[in-house]
Image (cartoon, helix red, strand yellow):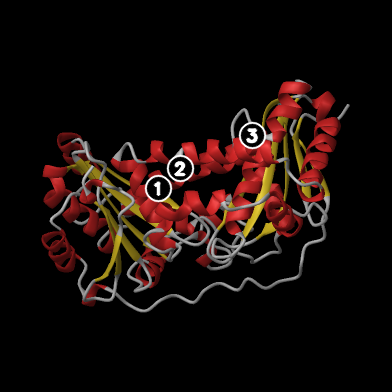
Amino acid sequence: MGERSDPLRMERRTLESGLELVLQPPPASARSFSISYVAPAGWGYEPRGAEGLATVAARMLVGMPGRRSREELARMLDRLGASLTSAVAPESAEVTAWGPEEAWGSLVEVFADAVFRPRFERDELTRVLRKLRERQLRQQVQPDLRAERELLSTLYPPGHPYRSTGVGTPRSASRISPEALRRFHRSHYPARSSVLVVTARGPMEPLVHSLERRFPSHELCGDPEVPSLLGRARTPRRVNIPLPGQSQVAVRIGAPSVPRGDPHYPELFLANQVLGGRPLLSRLFQRIREQHGLAYHASSELEAMRWGGYWEASAGTDPATRDRVVRLMLEEIGRLAGETVPPGELGRIRESSLGSLPLELETTASAHELAVDVAYHRLPVDFYRTWPDRLRRIRPRELRRAAEEGFSSEHAGIVTAGPPES
């Protein structure tokens, strides 16, 4: 494989506008490209009482960009064999275009229109709000979604950017107007702290020149104020949400943790893999499902973002076994910080985790997500080239020390959502 066909050989540039750009070669056999724009437009920036605004804005960006109608855009993407999508999170919103190499010119033009020139028309807003209300309803009655929402409410005080799930309430959705969407877009999407990420075959200079024309300085503005992360600390508590008519109980246990830039993030990443991050191999799955047959699923996740983060362990079980599953989950969480992981177990989990990296490099779309990660978190461009060595240097005692701080169950909230207890 030549140097320019290695997706891990990324490079960082700065456009004349000041916009940061991360360039990544696609996999050797790929004949497609991806481009993403990541802006400080997540739901953590929403004004109080306007929850759902960021989600609606992100969806409408890719619905009617520039002068195209939704139908015209759909026909164009279908003809090109391409896609234009958006995603939103607490800290950021992301617009992504993917398509064949020969569609670069046409698709990047549409992509720039989505970022800078969306149309927030009332008819389209009505359609998007209808879908948002469907999501609100599902979040209210489905055990997994409801438990997720309640856990974040347990961990974070009102006004904290991580407390919300981004869908808001029927009342907050009713306040979203085209004018509010335009204001939010103007103050967040053209921000100079946004980043561009491109996974495409070179030569690089013509590529950069093409982006300079479509993302000029006059389109950009200042950055929005970062939301406050302060607030009264939440007292750890257990919450049970009765959901009549459901057959399964969703269990969530979690607590605040570290941001992605924390020097001990690699140790905590590996600790999460041991706890519940590796399908079939991890402790939660092995003990709760394989040994005892008590759960439909059991896993854990470490959400390490730029401002902060949290960890979460989850399971789905029968109503009669909810208390036993909670107890077993807490035991495994405590054991992670209270006992040193045996070297053999750590080695198996580590190599399984590293074995997934080559799989991420098989397609343009999946390799592109690594570049987005590097760009948004301001990681070194060789981060994923050095990642395997970094993980292999971690010793069991280092993992345990990190878990004592990053996976503490003393500050954990516990949420169960499902059929009422009999």
Residue 374, percent from left and from top: 41, 58
User: Helix, strand, or loop for circle 3?
Assistant: loop
- Seen in the image, is 407 located left or right of residue 382? right
Q: In which quarter of the image is the C terminus?
A: top right
Whether residue 222 is visible, yes or no, is yes
Q: Residue 130 carries which label?
A: 2
Q: Could you tell me how far apart the alpha carbons at marks 3 and 2 are, in whole angstroms?
A: 18 Å
Q: Quadrant of residue 346?
A: top right
Rendered position, 337 above or below 374: above
Residue topped by disc 3: 142
Residue 271, percent from left and from top: 66, 47
- Seen in the image, is 127 located left or right of residue 321? left
Residue 166, percent from left and from top: 54, 53
User: Helix, strand, or loop for circle 1?
Assistant: helix
Near-viewer residue (261 or 17)? 261
Near-viewer residue (29 or 289)? 29
User: Helix, strand, or loop for circle 2?
Assistant: helix
> Which residue: 76% across, 70% down?
232
Q: Which amino acid does label 2 sit on?
A: Arg
Residue topped by disc 1: 126
Residue 335, percent from left and from top: 80, 44
Number of the front mark, 1 or 3: 3
Rendered position, 241 above or below 16: above
